[in-house]
Image: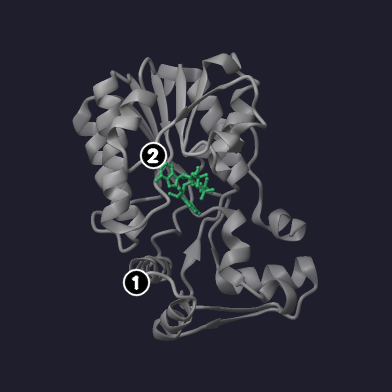
Amino acid sequence: MIAITGASGHLGKATIGFLINKIDPANIIAVVRDPEKMKDFPGIQVRVADYDDAASLRDALSGVKTLLQISSASYGDHATQQEKNVVDAASGAGVQHIVYTSTVNPGSQPIFFGSQTNQHTENAIRASGITYTFFRNSMYMETIPQFIGSAMEDGQIFYPAGEGKVSFVARTDIAEALANVLAAGEKHANAAYDITGTGAYSFSDIATLLASEKGLPASYTDIPASAFRDELVKLEMPPIAVDFYISMADSVKAGEFAHVDGALEGLLQRKRVVLKDYVRSL
Ligand SMILES: NC(=O)c1ccc[n+]([C@@H]2O[C@H](COP(=O)([O-])OP(=O)(O)OC[C@H]3O[C@@H](n4cnc5c(N)ncnc54)[C@H](OP(=O)(O)O)[C@@H]3O)[C@@H](O)[C@H]2O)c1
């Protein structure tokens, strides 16, 4: 039995979409808050659990051999506690292998809050003694439209990341590679993979791509972090979310997402999606 937390999200659904063609769908368990969201996958099992409810997670992971633990969508200490709840539940339920989605190239003291959470969870998984496979993902190409906002219309990007580069990777490539690893089992025991695109790109580079691939009069302005913070506050985000997004920009500026690695092509056994082609498809 292979269970997937966060199964109703973009990465979870995409991974299940590949996995149902590799193993018997009856052996896939989607762990979700809302079963209605899984009705596009009629052959799989669906169990209800919430990251904030340890007992529900223990029940949902009963009889599971392999778990794809998709990282929490929350922030800071809350995210760290949610992910610890999943690891504890997996440990209690006798799960033998956790495949966990972490963040690329985590240094010893990452700036990005998400990387800090992922480090805690990697450590908790290692401490549990459960076999692990870490997918240390760079940023998804599919998040670029959120970063660049109205630049999709006018080409003008405003973001406080200096000339920091990101090794953007297609979420669909990650999903297919995850499905390959889940189907292959112990071959990937106790491995950590940096999952990145083919190169690293600054937001200036993205502006250049918007110009060449979409014909937009594009440019990038490196705004002060304080101006970005003011914009996020205006959106009435909770303060912890504001700090999370500021930490993301600071981490890009510091080069935390610039690492490029070839592991993904080994897991896919084919070439990765190239950023230029993704931008052209927008
Ligand atoms: N590398 C990147 O660029 C990047 C970008 C964004 C996020 N991420 C990380 O990667 C993860 C997967 O990405 P994604 O695109 O699939 O994110 P997503 O579409 O936002 O999916 C998040 C998933 O988490 C579930 N979830 C949220 N709160 C939960 C809770 N309290 N208990 C149980 N499940 C809960 C959601 O369930 P519902 O359907 O019920 O809401 C959904 O299935 C994210 O959670 C985040 O940690 C990475």
Q: Amino acid at mark 1?
A: Pro
Residue 39, image x, y percentages:
64, 31
Marker count (numbered): 2
- The quadrant of the image that shows the C terminus is bottom right
Within 10 Å of disc 2 (Cα), the crowding (few <14, some 14-19, many 20+) is some
Q: Residue at x 56, y 15 (%)?
A: 26
The answer to whether residue 122 is above or below residue 91 is below
Label 1 or label 2, whichever lies nearer to me, is 2
Q: Please identify the quarter of the rendering in which residue 102 is found.
A: top left
Task: Name, please, the residue furthest toward the left.
Answer: 127
Residue 27, image x, y percentages:
52, 15
On whether ligand 1 comes within 8 Å of the CB at mark 1, the answer is: no
| Image mark for residue 169 | none
Indicate the secondary structure of the residue bearing disc 1. helix
Q: Which residue is mark 1?
A: 239
Q: Is residue 239 visible?
A: yes
Q: Amino acid at mark 2?
A: Asp
Q: Is residue 158 left or right of residue 236?
A: right
| Image mark for residue 50 | 2
Between 133 and 72, the one nearer to me in the picture = 72
Between 109 and 145, the one nearer to me in the picture = 145
On whether ligand 1 comes within 8 Å of the CB at mark 2, the answer is: yes
Q: Is residue 83 left or right of residue 171?
A: left
